[in-house]
């Protein structure tokens, strides 16, 4: 009786990390990779670039909605979705910098979450006791709030709207809070007996 729940719990994360099947939410996440590539040359044409932003935003909402409807099939998407999000927003920042000559003091705060998570990732990889921990990649509501703020800031920058500066600093604030949530989540996972 005592072995069945243990084995079940042990198998769940392993299945989640070894499944390589792409489902519909995963494909919707992957759509943001070519969209990011397309945004860079289109950033100098605000209406077209805004259309790319809108399609990316819809794909982001749809993949999350579909993943929540069938959570047992989202294992790959748990890390694929945030990776595609980050690729897209970095491509957007590059496009805005190259085409719109947007100031770095406005662009860099938009990437606060990405920079903070990169630091957390490096800590995870460089600290030997943390390397074996399987991190929980599931999205958090704050992460979605950061993504929404980033999309709004990018749209404002496309049309050189003065609100872009305030939206960029909102991205920075939400990004730091989000990184704190992810760091705490990692700390909780590290303290679990099964983590060792």
Image (tube, rainbow, N blue to C red):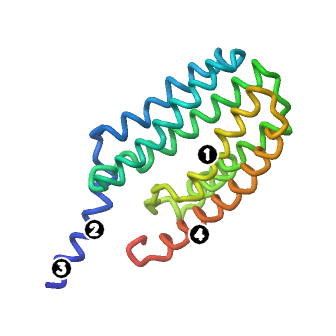
Q: Which residue is mark 2?
A: 10
Task: Residue 62: name its quadrant.
Answer: top left
Q: Disc 3 or 1, which lies upstream in sequence?
A: 3
Q: Nearer the viewer, mark 4 or mark 2?
A: 4
Q: Which residue is mark 4?
A: 184
Residue 185, x across and y down, in percent: 53, 67
Q: Disc 1 or 4, which lies upstream in sequence?
A: 1
Q: Nearer the viewer, mark 3 or mark 1?
A: 1
Picture quarter with the C terminus: bottom left
Q: Nearer the viewer, residue 186 or 54?
A: 54
Mark 3–mark 1 Cα distance, whole angstroms, equals 44 Å
Q: Nearer the viewer, residue 153 or 74?
A: 153
Classify 66 as above or below 40: below
Mark 1–mark 2 Cα distance, whole angstroms, equals 35 Å
Residue 115, x across and y down, in percent: 69, 47
Q: Disc 1 or 2, which lies upstream in sequence?
A: 2
Kindly identify the residue that appears in the image at 68 percent across and 54 percent down. 175
């Amino acid at each position: 009786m005592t072995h069945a729940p243990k084995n079940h719990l042990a198998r769940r994360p392993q299945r989640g990390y070894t499944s390589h099947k792409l489902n519909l939410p995963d494909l919707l996440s992957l759509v943001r990779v070519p969209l990011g590539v397309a945004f860079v040359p289109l950033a100098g044409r605000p209406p077209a670039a805004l259309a790319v932003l809108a399609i990316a935003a819809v794909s982001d909402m749809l993949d999350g909605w579909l993943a929540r409807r069938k959570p047992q099939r989202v294992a790959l998407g748990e890390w694929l979705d945030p990776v595609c999000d980050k690729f897209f927003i970095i491509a957007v920042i590059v496009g805005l910098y190259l085409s719109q000559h947007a100031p770095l003091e406005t662009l860099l705060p938009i990437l606060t979450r990405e920079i903070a998570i990169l630091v957390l990732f490096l800590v995870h990889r460089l600290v030997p006791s943390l390397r074996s921990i399987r991190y929980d990649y599931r999205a958090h509501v704050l992460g979605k709030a950061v993504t929404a703020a980033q999309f709004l800031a990018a749209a404002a920058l496309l049309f050189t709207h003065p609100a872009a500066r305030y939206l960029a600093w909102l991205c920075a604030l939400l990004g730091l809070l989000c990184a704190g949530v992810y760091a705490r989540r990692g700390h909780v996972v590290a303290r679990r007996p099964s983590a060792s």
